[in-house]
Image (tube, grey):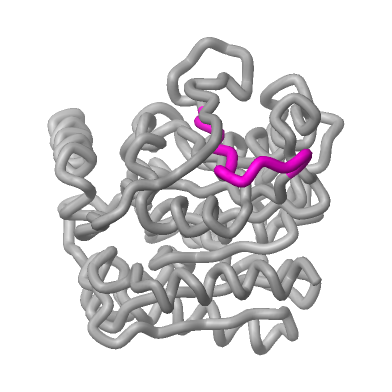
């Protein structure tokens, strides 16, 4: 068991060092993100831990305040320090150009702490944005989450659990909020989310062709196998929390994704639509897990989606 976990961690580190080639595809860009100011390594919990730090980028066009998008890196939940590789020159660059403040947080890896630690971290980030709005020029009338791969999972989970503190499924009760940081009285609700290639139905990752591992990333995250623990996997899955009151969500997924199968995005969209939630979905022909996903047209679609929600 210990050797297997160490192997998975090693794989994750390799992934990060190679621009997420295994879990994240090639996300190289011929441009660099442009910003007026960067606040680096801000600890959003106050505990001195690297996995509880974030970076803040403000747009080049200076204004009194900026709407906020929190963008979460992908790593199969194995990386606790990936904010420096969080799609900076693609998704984040497009958001900055459109006038959004961009927050890229670290979060605890599955080898640091079992779920729900990871969503507790993201909820703490959202509360931090509200609590530190004046200092960092945040317009908290619009806070959205976005993420790629496992980051898409966390971005989606933050959105569909808006308004929920706990949730009960059978005999399992989950605390969705946590109590991290100085701003526990602030709301962790978000106004919208974009899910880029995220796993959202963790009980059904075999719905299509996907990366096979001796022990799945979701099992490492939960700490027990799925058989006999189905409710725990359901409580990890954004699809479980879908309801008509969810904030608007846009799903982006590629038909050639060999890490998180496209049926994950399709199922999420159908569940949202069936519940009466506001949602959009773009299935990208020939899109892989990070490959061929970040065209100007697709990035503009994200910007247009957020603009529509803000009206």
Q: Residue at x 57, y 73 (%)?
A: 250
* Quarter of the rendering occupied by the C terminus: bottom right
Pick whichever, 72 or 118, lies toward us: 72
Q: Is residue 60 magenta?
A: yes
Q: Position of residue 229 (x, y in %)?
A: 47, 55
The image quarter in which residue 127 lies? top right
* Outermost residue toward the top in this view: 48
Q: Is residue 132 magenta?
A: no
Q: Position of residue 278 (x, y in %)?
A: 71, 80
* Outermost residue toward the right in this view: 185
Pick whichever, 223 or 292, lies toward us: 292
Numbered range of the magenta stretch = 54-65
State left or right for residue 40 relative to residue 303: left
Q: Residue at x 73, y 35 (%)?
A: 137
* Outermost residue toward the front in this view: 61
Q: Position of residue 152 (x, y in %)?
A: 47, 58
Q: Can residue 116 be spotted in the picture?
A: no
State left or right for residue 175 relative to residue 200: right
Look at the picture and state if 16 lies above or below 252: above
State left or right for residue 32 relative to residue 72: left
The image quarter in which residue 47 lies? top right
Q: Position of residue 243 (x, y in %)?
A: 73, 74
Q: Residue at x 33, y 36 (%)?
A: 79
Look at the picture and state if 35 lies above or below 239: above
Q: Residue at x 48, y 15 (%)?
A: 49
Q: How many marks?
A: 0
Q: Can residue 157 be spotted in the picture?
A: yes
* Quarter of the rendering occupied by the N terminus: top left
């Amino acid at each position: 068991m210990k050797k297997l976990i160490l192997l998975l961690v090693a794989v994750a580190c390799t992934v990060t060092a190679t621009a997420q080639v295994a879990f994240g595809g090639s996300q190289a860009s011929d441009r660099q993100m442009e910003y007026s100011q960067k606040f680096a390594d801000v600890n959003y919990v106050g505990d001195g831990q690297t996995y509880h730090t974030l970076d803040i980028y403000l747009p080049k066009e200076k204004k009194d305040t900026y709407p906020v998008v929190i963008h979460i890196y992908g790593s199969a939940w194995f990386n606790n320090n990936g904010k420096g590789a969080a799609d900076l020159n693609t998704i984040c660059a497009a958001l900055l150009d459109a006038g959004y403040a961009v927050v890229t947080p670290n979060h605890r890896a599955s080898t640091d702490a079992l779920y729900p630690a990871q969503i507790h971290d993201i909820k703490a980030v959202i509360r931090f944005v509200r609590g530190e709005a004046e200092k960092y020029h945040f317009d908290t009338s619009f806070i959205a989450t976005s993420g790629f791969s496992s980051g898409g999972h966390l971005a989606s989970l933050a959105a569909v659990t808006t308004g929920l503190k706990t949730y009960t499924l059978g005999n399992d009760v989950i605390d969705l909020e946590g109590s991290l940081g100085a701003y526990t009285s602030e709301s962790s609700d978000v106004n919208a989310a974009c899910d880029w290639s995220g796993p959202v139905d963790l009980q059904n990752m075999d719905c299509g062709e996907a990366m096979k591992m001796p022990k799945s990333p979701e099992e490492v995250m939960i700490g027990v196998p799925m058989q006999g623990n189905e409710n725990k996997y359901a409580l990890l899955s954004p699809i479980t929390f879908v309801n008509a009151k969810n904030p608007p969500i846009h799903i982006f997924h590629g038909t050639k994704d060999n890490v998180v199968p496209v049926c994950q995005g399709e199922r999420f969209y159908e569940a949202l639509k069936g519940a009466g939630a506001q949602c959009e979905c773009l299935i990208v022909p020939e899109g892989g897990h990070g490959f061929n996903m970040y065209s100007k047209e697709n990035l503009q679609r994200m910007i247009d989606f957020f603009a529509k929600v803000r009206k």
